[in-house]
Amino acid sequence: MRRKKTLIILCIILAVAIVAIVIEHAVKQHVDKINTVDEEVFAITNDEVTNLSVEYGSDSVTLEKTDDVWHYTEDADFPVDQDKVADLFSNFESVHASFIIDDVTDYAQYGLGAPQATVTFTTADGDRVVTFGDYSTIDQKRYICVDGGSVYLIDTDFLEDLSGAVGDYLDSDEVYDYQQLTNLTMSGDASVNVEYDPDGDYTYTDAYDYYSVDGDSHKALSSSKIDTLLTTLQSMDLSKYETYKATSDDVAKYGLDNPNITVKITGEVAKDSDEDSDDEDVETETKNQTLYLTKKDDDHAYAYFEGSTIIYDLKPEMYDEIAKASYESLRPDEIVNIDWTAVDNIAVNIGEDSYIIDVDTDKKDGNTYTIDGEKVDLTAASSEINNLSLTDAGSDYSKGAQEMSFTITLTDDDATQVKVVLSQYDGNSCVATVDGETVGLVSRTSMSTLREDITSAILNKGKDTDKDSDENATN
């Protein structure tokens, strides 16, 4: 009995050894068929191909070329983005591999039994087929098969650049990449009228380039906020659409004949889209665009460009973001923007006390501040005035008692004055009024710091603050 058990164990060991030898031999055979290469294994150009078919996952699309223009085979009215097709071909113009596997008998082990993607190019000489298999995490490369033959590990994995969804080939509209915005108007739920006028003489300062225009009224706007608004319009997700051959009935169906927001943009666009936008010598041309936006409900919003045939699904949250545009959302955060080298004096009112601080400017030594000929140190306070920023913009605030005010007189021919009044609002904020117009709320802490620094400077007038500071440091 014991001898029989021993015999069985020996047989099992022998069987395991035989299997191991077979596996080792098979692996050795497999390894022997893999060769290291560094060569181009596939190349094709747009000019050679008359039909293009892409299968990716559950999606598939076929395009055909007529007179050098690509069309969707199932609907010739579908506007195919010729640049996107060209981008696809750029991946196949020269495909290089690091490894080649010849005499493949089991394509499944490379993920090629059921490929992740198949691209078929039809040429005058027949079809060329490239299939995409698994990604080798060890080699950091993708397996592909060319024309059902050898398997390659390619140097650049461009699987994610492919798509079998026809919508990804749609020649979508877009807000241009403006080199310089010159005018932007929005009406409806959003309301702005922006003009670019860097030489405009509308305010006490030349620090602003954009203005909100209402008749003869020009109010300064923040350049960075204008840029952000334009970027928001340019970043609208227009990848989904309701129809790509919209009729007037379709426009009315989606509420775009009477839109909630109308956007009109005028600006300078580079003539050659391949030119570097940072190049100051880029040749530009004036372009105009009008687009319409409508929000039906919390789940449905739409966009439509004038002259287009496509009605896009717009994310409602994107619509809501665009609808926030107003003068208040675009005005500068700073209450004032003073060039202190162009100030003649500043009149300050704190409580029942009033002071006039004269300003003398020296290009070498900077500003000197005096009250009745006695020096005051207003360096910190002047910076704090320029740093007074809105925490909330608007005009509908109830004002309490005045906390402080200051009127800055400039050295220009008109002796232009800028008056700022800070009034009580609540424990955290003060209402800011500039030249009689309420502009919003500022931090009460900022107001208190400014008031204390001005008061301290006035109380210490006539003292050589720099000398005192040096002596205190020495002591």
Image (spheres, grey):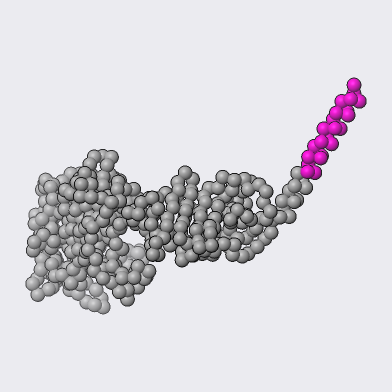
Q: Residue furthest top?
A: 1
Choose top left, top right, bottom left or bottom right for residue 102. Answer: bottom right
Taking 45 as reference, is 200 left or right? left
- Residue visible at 45% across and 60% down in the picture: 50
Q: Which range of residues does the magenta coloring cover?
A: 1-22
Q: Residue 225: horizontal and vertical position, in percent?
A: 25, 58
Quadrant containing the N terminus in the rendered view: top right
**Looking at the image, which residue is at 30% across and 46% down?**
242
State the residue in front, 448 or 2: 2
Judged left or right of residue 339, residue 96 is right
Identify the residue shown where x is 48% and y is 65%.
Answer: 48
The vertical placement of 213 against 444, above or below, is below
Our reading of the magenta stretch's main secondary structure is helix
Residue 155 visible in the picture: yes
Residue 176 part of the magenta-drawn span: no
Image vertical order of residue 276 relative to residue 16, above or below: below
Q: How many marks?
A: 0
Left or right: 341 in relation to 412? right
- Does the magenta run of residues contain 4? yes
Q: Nearer the viewer, residue 261 or 421?
A: 261
Comparing 420 with 195, the one in front is: 195
Give the x, y percent position of residue 108: 62, 45
Q: Position of residue 219 (x, y in %)?
A: 14, 61
Q: Nearer the viewer, residue 259 or 367?
A: 259
